[in-house]
Image: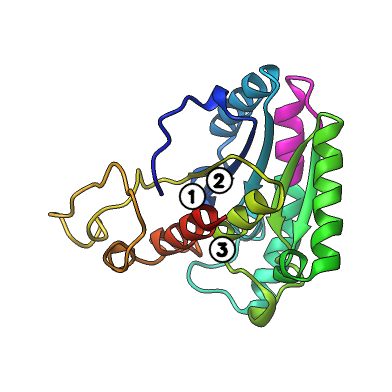
Amino acid sequence: MTATRKPLASHRRIVIKIGSALLVDRKTGLKSQWLDAVCADIAALKARGIDVLVVSSGAIAMGRTVLDLPSGALKLEESQAAAAVGQIALARAWSESLSRDGIVAGQILLTLGDTEERRRYLNARATINQLLKIGAVPIINENDTVATTEIRYGDNDRLAARVATMTSADLLVLLSDIDGLYTAPPHLDPDAKFLETVPAITPEIEAMAGGAASELSRGGMRTKIDAGKIATGA
């Protein structure tokens, strides 16, 4: 969670995680202009010779919009069906937007076991590294269509940190509709103060983090703190 003091362009390999609320509007679906702006930024980084990997949430959120599922919590099979529909739309959106700058997107779907079981870990790493070698941008997401509660991350913050570790990235960026860590969840406490920099993740810092703030999210600040611990530990 420590803020980087170096410009993005000074890094060699960057993992960017994008939350569902940034990509998908519950009523209208994909936020196309926002996605195009991010892809333009990615193209600018790649033009400088920087490897960029994207961990993109949004499959379930897009799927439930396409399928017009009701608000509120979904059953496991409903989430998996929404992911199956939404992942196609999500991958197409990334591919089309990146292609405007001549960039090829490659889809990688991972489960918890893919980053913890040695053989699968090495296979996933080799595939991602090959995509980077040929100039493609890996678009990575959890494989929500098959992952159940016992074998899933459940959020893409920690997955992004594992991907950053797996690929020896030197910068992990977690993009969210919340501008950072507050001393308390700002939607619950109007007196919450914003912390610009977190020099170390302590029990006090962990206690400040809340859970997911919307039905589109499965993480929240708590999982971002966990991701920070994974990344700084690596």
Q: Is residue 139 left or right of residue 33?
A: right
Q: Mark 2 points at which residue?
A: 18
Q: In this view, does 145 lie to the left or right of 27?
A: right
Q: Mark 1 points at which residue?
A: 21
Disc 2/disc 1 C-alpha distance (Å): 9 Å
Q: From what the image shows, is residue 117 above or below residue 187?
A: below
Q: Name the residue under label 3.
A: 155
Q: What residue type is labelled 2?
A: Ile
Q: Which amino acid does label 1 sit on?
A: Ala
Which is nearer the eye, 45 or 88?
45
Residue in view at x 64 percent, y 30 percent: 12
Q: Is residue 168 magenta?
A: no
Q: Which amino acid does label 3 sit on?
A: Asp
Can residue 216 be seen at all in this image of the molecule? no
| Residue, far bottom | 150
Q: Does the magenta stretch include residue 100?
A: yes
Q: How many labels does the image show?
A: 3
